Amino acid sequence: MPIHLTKKEIFSQDKALVQSYKALLEHQKQIKNFFANNKAASLTFMGAGSSYSLCRSAAISANMYTDFNAHSLAAGDLMMNFSHYEKYLSNTILIAPSRSGNTSEVVRAVKQAKREFDVPCVAVTAAEESDISALADLKLTFPWIYDESVCQTRTVTNLYMIQLFIIGVIGGQKRMLEELETAVQKEAVYMDENREKLKRIAEKVEWEKVVVLGDSELEGIADEAAIAFKEIPRIASNYHHILDVRHGPMVLVDEQTLVIMAVAPFELSLQNDLIGDLQNREAVVCSVGASKQEVINSDYHIQVPEYENYGVMGIPFIYVPQVIAYYKAVQRGVNPDQPPELDSWVEL
């Protein structure tokens, strides 16, 4: 079997998370002062592709844990429809996570926002030198999270954690920062414990399409999981809120479907009923949550630590679809590092 970059990047993300958390502690005062000194009414998280999915989760978390109004924008949408979002950009701080920092939509949108509204910008990138960092008022760079493969895995997990850390600092959420540290420290053992089970799901279970379900703060990271299946093994995949899968999408669930469900810590009976309905349609259900296997009646269950801040669960959650997607790509004989006609970032 060839040694794929994707494999290396997925299984080194635990070490990258430790390094990123350490760097964030060193930047903590700088981050806190930046947001305190730039008086604004809102936060606008903006990205493209996988980064935009992360922005969706970050905006929900920021609304929960800070005094800012927060929203997320797809950079291409903002770039093409700038006048529609002027109220978003008035008196906001722009936060732009990006692997390369050079994606055209993001760069153009940041330039226009700064030119027309003098918007302070925070760039969070994996590349040491980038166009977005050159425009930013605060740049946070984490080169050890950079994914060389086209499909992002290690970068995604780290950018997700980094944004949560920033939100915890802004909101004075000491407990969240503690739980992030715990999640980072536990990631290596968690990854090792579940690797073979996830490999079996990819290789031994028959499925040809994926539905990813997740709610609340995990909305964006669950959507990113669906993107990973499109890009890495080239499998048809979709994301839905947990109960929304009943509203139309259920008609496409069948014996060829793998469902990956991020179990919310509330209303377990409703979620168990849904799992039963999915199984009645002969789908294979892999649940990810803090409850024990016997509480969740899924076909496969990945237990994660329980956190008071639900968003922290996104860190162990995203590992599950990444690993399954990788091993499915290997089984299908496709190169997970280089999807055809897809580049690491888009230049218009």
Image: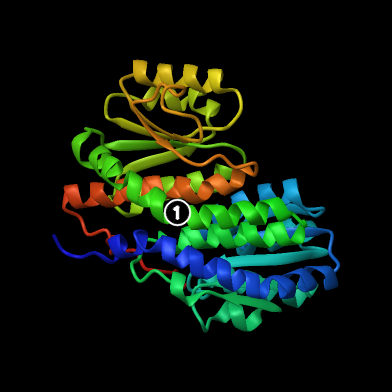
Left or right: 226, with 257 as reference point: right
Q: Position of residue 245 (x, y in %)?
A: 49, 27
SS category of the residue bearing label 1: helix
The image quadrant that residue 116 belongs to is bottom right
Q: Is residue 270 above or below residue 133?
A: above
Q: Is residue 167 above or below residue 258?
A: below
The one of 206 and 13 positioned closer to us in this rendering = 13
The image quadrant that residue 93 belongs to is bottom right
Left or right: 71, with 130 as reference point: right
Residue type at mark 1 is: Glu
The one of 92 and 4 positioned closer to us in this rendering = 4
Visible in this render: residue 277?
yes
Visible in this render: residue 49?
no
Q: How many marks?
A: 1
The image quadrant that residue 249 belongs to is top left
Q: At 84% across and 59% down in the image, what residue appears?
A: 41
Q: At 57% across and 70% down in the image, what residue appears?
A: 22
> In the rendered view, how is the structure colored?
rainbow
Q: Position of residue 209 (x, y in %)?
A: 31, 37
Residue that label 1 marks: 187
Q: Residues within 10 Å of mark 1 (few under 14, many from 20)?
A: many
Q: At 33% across and 25% down in the image, what residue appears?
A: 283
Q: Position of residue 121 (x, y in %)?
A: 70, 72
The one of 109 and 69 positioned closer to us in this rendering = 69
Q: Position of residue 284 (x, y in %)?
A: 32, 27
The N terminus appears in which quarter of the rendering? bottom left
The one of 318 and 100 positioned closer to us in this rendering = 318
